[in-house]
Amino acid sequence: MVWGLVAALSAAVCYGVAAVMQALAARSAVDTDGGVDPRLLVRLLGQWRFVVGLGLDVVGFVLQILALRVLPLFLVQASLAASLAVTAVLATWLVGAVLGWREWVAVAVVCLGLTVLGVSAEGGESAVEVGLGFHWSLVAAAALLGLLGMAAGRLPDRARTPLLGLVAGLAFGLVAIASRVLSGVGATDLVSDPAAYAVPVAGVLAFLFYASALQRGGVTAATAMMVIGETVVPALVGTTMLGDETRPGFAPVAVAGFVVAVAGAVALARFGEVGAEPAEGKPE
């Protein structure tokens, strides 16, 4: 369990650094002002900061999968929410952002919540085996999120940004759920398992919708909603359907730790604003 927690927290560091790089890249991309544009990812791939962030995301994803094999979903996803604490601290160095006492308290709250979760969580992989229908439902859920995200992209900016952030978070959460229930990591297992196809589809959609939210809207709202989507839903699925458990008698403690960690992460969401420099209309 210890090495799984180390993997989850290391993934949070990778995601936190990547978030700073991608926020800067997304804000400097050309805005087509026409809803969600899949070509945005292609344009972003021409920017070194986005590519570096993408590489860190890949490393973080591998670490996340390792953590999901031995830890409950609620612990892994709350640990990943701590990436915002990494983003906040890193922003003070890379872009000169200043953390006030409230932000430092929020960082401490995230750490406290994760510590409580780590103490209360029961280690070990889920004892519940889900059927093939559940695996196929993940593919259907990815398709549904794609439709919802495209529809959200057509809304006015005030509603567009938080909804895109929420859909992106749900897609990231779907990646975690699908990774958790994979029947195996061998070539044969991946080819025959529908959940394996849900992972890349949901992952690409999550990147697209979050980048779209970062490009034109208030990043605070997008990031806060993303954190909620990628933590709360996987936690519910894990505890109700996948057999995730806490130590005997520690369920209330785990709930408190989860709420505290996520609340601290949401409070730090404004540090997505590190990319909020005015766009010049030209990609770097």
Image (spheres, rainbow, N blue to C red):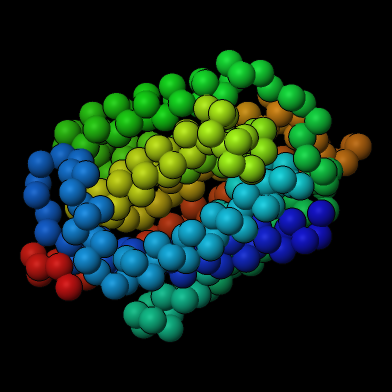
Quarter occupied by the N terminus = bottom right
Across and down, in percent, residue 116 comes to 77, 54
Q: Nearer the viewer, residue 222 or 68?
A: 68
Q: Is residue 77 visible?
A: yes
Q: Nearer the viewer, residue 94 or 254?
A: 94
Residue displayed at 47% across by 33% down? 198
Residue displayed at 77% across by 54% down? 118
Residue displayed at 24% across by 33% down? 150
Q: Is residue 16 visible?
A: no
- Whether 273 is drawn above or below 199: the answer is below
Q: Residue furthest top?
A: 133
Residue displayed at 36% across by 55% down? 220
Across and down, in percent, residue 253 comes to 79, 44
206 relative position to 7: left or right? left
264 relative position to 36: left or right? right
Q: Residue furthest right?
A: 248
Across and down, in percent, residue 123 comes to 83, 46
91 relative position to 83: left or right? left
Q: Could you say which quadrant of the image residue 232 lies in?
A: top right
